[in-house]
Image (tube, rainbow, N blue to C red):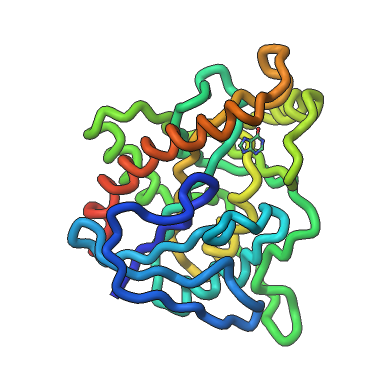
C-alpha cells in the first residue's frame, strides 16, 4: 500500500513512469478532490499521484478543493506528500529553471478553506506551524538532487498569493521586503492541512519566470509555458530519485 503521494502541479498532470494499478475517486466530507488518486509502482516503490489542478488542468489555484485533496490522501493511508509546483523567482539566485525546496511560507491568500478544525461539528485546535515543511522530507529531496547533480536551492520562503492573476510589481516588491524567495499560488492551505492530519509534507518548487517587475520587464506568459515543461523535467528527476529513499 502506498504511503507516499506526489501532488503534481502545472506541467505535471500525470506521473511518467508510473505503472498504474488502480484509480480511485474518493468521496470526502468536503466534496470531491481534484481527481482520482492514481496508485501504482514507480521504480519498485508503491506511490499515489494526484493532479492538483485536475487531469486537464482545469481547476485554478483559488478553486482547488484543498481540504478534499488532503482528506482523500489521508483516508487512502498516505503519510508523506511531495508537492510539486511552478513558482516565480523573487530572490536573485532564483532564475528561471532553478528548483527550490523552501523551508518557510508567508500566506497572502484569502477566502480559502484552510483548516479541518473549523468548529462544530469539528473540534477547535491550534496546531504548531512554526516550521511548515517536514525537514526530513526536505532533506531527502535535497540529497537526491545533489547525488544527481541537479542544481537546487535549499531553503527559502514561499510567498503564496491568491491568483489566478500574476502579481503587480509593487506586490512583488513588498514580498521581497517581507523576505519571500519565491512566489506561487498553491502551497497554502495544502501544507497546513497536511500538518493538521500529521502527514509529512515538502515542496519541490520549479521557477518558471522571474517575478513581476524584477528586471524591469513584464512577464511573457508564452515563455512561462515553455519554462514549465523544461523545469518539470528536472523536478521529475529529483522526485524519482527521492522516492526510493522515502518509501519504507
Ligand atoms: N506568481 C505566482 N505564481 C506563479 C508565478 C508567479 O510569478 N509563476 C508561476 N506561478
| Placement of 15 over or under 178, stated as above or below | below
Q: Is residue 181 visible?
A: no
Expressed as whole percent of the image width and height from the top left, the position of residue 152 reads: 39, 30
Task: Work out whether 1 lies above or below 45.
Answer: below
Q: Can the viewer see residue 145?
A: yes
User: Looking at the image, is 161 positioned above or below residue 190?
Assistant: above
State the residue at coordinates (40%, 75%): 23
Residue 149 is situated, as x and y percent measured from the top left of the image, at 26, 28
Residue at 71% across, 60% down: 63
Task: Single out the residue that lies furthest toward the left.
Answer: 44
Quick one: which residue is furthest to the bottom in this view?
121
Direction top: furthest residue: 216
On the image, the x and y values in percent for residue 96 come to 51, 24
In this rendering, position of residue 29 left or right of residue 166? left
Q: Answer with left or right where residue 217 lies relative to residue 235.
A: right
Instruction: Name the residue: 74% across, 47% down.
Output: 162
Quarter-of-image position of residue 159: top right
How far across and how far down the image is residue 122, in percent? 68, 82
Quarter in which the C terminus is drawn: bottom left
Is 146 in front, or is 105?
146
In this view of the protein, which residue sits in the foreground, 151 or 64?
64
Asked if residue 27 lies left or right of residue 80, the reply is: right
Residue that appears at 65% across and 73% down: 116
Count of marks overlaid on the render: 0
Ligand 1 resides in the quarter of the picture at top right
Left or right: where 69 falls relative to 175 = left
Residue 76, located in which quarter of the rendered image?
bottom left
Task: Choose between 37 and 98: the one closer to the eye.
Answer: 37
Amino acid at each position: 500500500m502506498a504511503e507516499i503521494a506526489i501532488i503534481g502541479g502545472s506541467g505535471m498532470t500525470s506521473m511518467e513512469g508510473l505503472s498504474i494499478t488502480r484509480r480511485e475517486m474518493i468521496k470526502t466530507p468536503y466534496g470531491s478532490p481534484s481527481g482520482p488518486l492514481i496508485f501504482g509502482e514507480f521504480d519498485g516503490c508503491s506511490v499515489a499521484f494526484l493532479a492538483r489542478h485536475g487531469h486537464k488542468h482545469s481547476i485554478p489555484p483559488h478553486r482547488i478543493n484543498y481540504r478534499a485533496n488532503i482528506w482523500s490522501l489521508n483516508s487512502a493511508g498516505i503519510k508523506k506528500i511531495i508537492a510539486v509546483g511552478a513558482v516565480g523567482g523573487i530572490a536573485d539566485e532564483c532564475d528561471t529553471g532553478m528548483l527550490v525546496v523552501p523551508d518557510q511560507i508567508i500566506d497572502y491568500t484569502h477566502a480559502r478553506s484552510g483548516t479541518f478544525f473549523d468548529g462544530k461539528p469539528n473540534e477547535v485546535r491550534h496546531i504548531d506551524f512554526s516550521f511548515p515543511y517536514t525537514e526530513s522530507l526536505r532533506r531527502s529531496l535535497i540529497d537526491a538532487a545533489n547525488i544527481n547533480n541537479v542544481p537546487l536551492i535549499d531553503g527559502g520562503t514561499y510567498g503564496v498569493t491568491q491568483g489566478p492573476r500574476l502579481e503587480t510589481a509593487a506586490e512583488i516588491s513588498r514580498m521581497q521586503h517581507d523576505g519571500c524567495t519565491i512566489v506561487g499560488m498553491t502551497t497554502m492551505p495544502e501544507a497546513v492541512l497536511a500538518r493538521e492530519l500529521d502527514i509529512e509534507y515538502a515542496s519541490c518548487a520549479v521557477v518558471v519566470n522571474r517575478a513581476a517587475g524584477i528586471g524591469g520587464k513584464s512577464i511573457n506568459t508564452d515563455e512561462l509555458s515553455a519554462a514549465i515543461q523544461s523545469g518539470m523535467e528536472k523536478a521529475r528527476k529529483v522526485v524519482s530519485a527521492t522516492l526510493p529513499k522515502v518509501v519504507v
